């Protein structure tokens, strides 16, 4: 039976999720650890290929095990052979038509911004930093223009390989917790750099360098040239991926810390 895994990682020391020759990637580390448990090569497919420096609380992958093992063995066996910045959180047998990417209904990303005149030290590599003061109320008002089904061409990278730019954003919340501003984005799928480009636009508006209506102007332009800067990857986290209930992928009530 196919196995689904939930994987947590700090992305700072990785060149993204996807396997690449000559660099350290999350996929390569996970597959080597699973191969030790299976005593055979293992190939994984993930829900979303995160970029260099991007983190995950619940990246979902699936694989077809070459050897029968209990879910507990996949979790604890893999963790025994993973580096400290990756951990398998759960393992679940699923039916054979489950696909980590194509079966997903929604994806939830969080972008964390440190709003401070001084740069971070302990949080370096784990948050984005804005030395310009940000007004989260302006950011929240601007975010409302991006909710719904839209052509997000202005928010996709030039390297994006998606077949079309239309996506549905179900939530785009902006909240403040002390010096930290959280952007929580839930959509059916995301274009390459879409969340980071949204964050860049909202940060420009929050700093007062652009008017609140600029988010709508950028969206309606459908032109990446009009889309402003791409926010850095350090503040981006894949929080969770939602699937139809028949697959049995469940999450505990969210108890995420700020970081």
Image: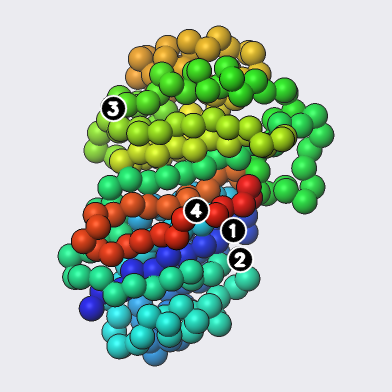
Q: Is residue 232 visible?
A: no
> Which is nearer the N-term, disc 2 or disc 3?
2
Numbered badge on residue 149: 3
Name the outermost residue toward the front.
253
Q: Secondary structure under badge 3?
A: strand
Q: How packed is label 2: few (under 14 Cα within 10 Å), some, or many (20 or more)?
A: some
Q: Earlier in the sequence, mark 4 or mark 2?
A: 2
**Residue 25, above or below 157:** below
Please tell me whether mark 3 or mark 4 is closer to you in this view: 4
Q: Position of residue 183 (x, y in %)?
A: 53, 35
Q: Please say if the residues under marks 2 and 3 sit with CB atoms less than 8 Å apart.
A: no
* Residue 60 quadrant: bottom left
Q: Distance between the residues labelled 2 and 1?
A: 5 Å
What label does residue 85 carry, if any? 2
Q: Residues within 10 Å of mark 3 (few under 14, many from 20)?
A: few
Q: Which of marks 3 and 1 is nearer the N terminus?
A: 1
- Which quarter of the figure has residue 127? top right
Label 1, secondary structure: give it.
Answer: loop
Instruction: Assess whether mark 1 and mark 2 are in contact (beta carbons under 8 angstroms).
Output: yes
Q: Badge 1 is on which residue?
A: 10
Q: State the residue position of label 4.
A: 254
Residue at 53% x, 69% y is: 87
């Amino acid at each position: 039976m196919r196995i689904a895994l939930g994987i947590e990682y700090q992305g700072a020391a990785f060149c993204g999720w996807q396997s690449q020759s000559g660099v350290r990637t999350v996929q390569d580390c996970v597959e080597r650890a699973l191969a030790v448990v299976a005593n055979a090569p293992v190939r994984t497919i993930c829900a979303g290929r995160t970029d260099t420096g991007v983190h995950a609380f619940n990246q979902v992958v699936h694989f077809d095990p070459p050897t029968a093992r209990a879910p507990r063995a996949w979790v604890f066996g893999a963790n025994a052979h993973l580096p400290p910045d990756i951990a398998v959180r759960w393992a679940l047998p699923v039916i054979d038509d489950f696909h980590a990417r194509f079966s997903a209904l929604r994806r939830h990303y969080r972008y964390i911004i440190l709003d401070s005149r001084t740069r971070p030290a302990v949080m370096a590599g784990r948050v984005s930093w804005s030395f310009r003061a940000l007004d989260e109320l302006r950011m929240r008002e601007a975010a409302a223009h991006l909710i719904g089904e839209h052509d997000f061409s202005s928010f996709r990278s030039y390297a994006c390989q998606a077949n079309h730019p239309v996506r549905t954003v179900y939530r785009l919340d902006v909240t403040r917790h002390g010096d930290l501003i959280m952007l929580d984005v839930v959509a059916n799928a995301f274009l390459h750099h879409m969340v980071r480009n949204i964050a860049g636009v909202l940060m420009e508006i929050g700093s007062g360098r652009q008017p609140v209506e600029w988010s709508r102007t950028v969206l309606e332009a459908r032109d990446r040239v009009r889309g402003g800067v791409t926010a850095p990857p350090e503040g981006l986290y894949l929080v969770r991926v939602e699937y139809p209930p028949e697959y049995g992928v469940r999450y505990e009530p969210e108890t995420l810390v700020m970081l």
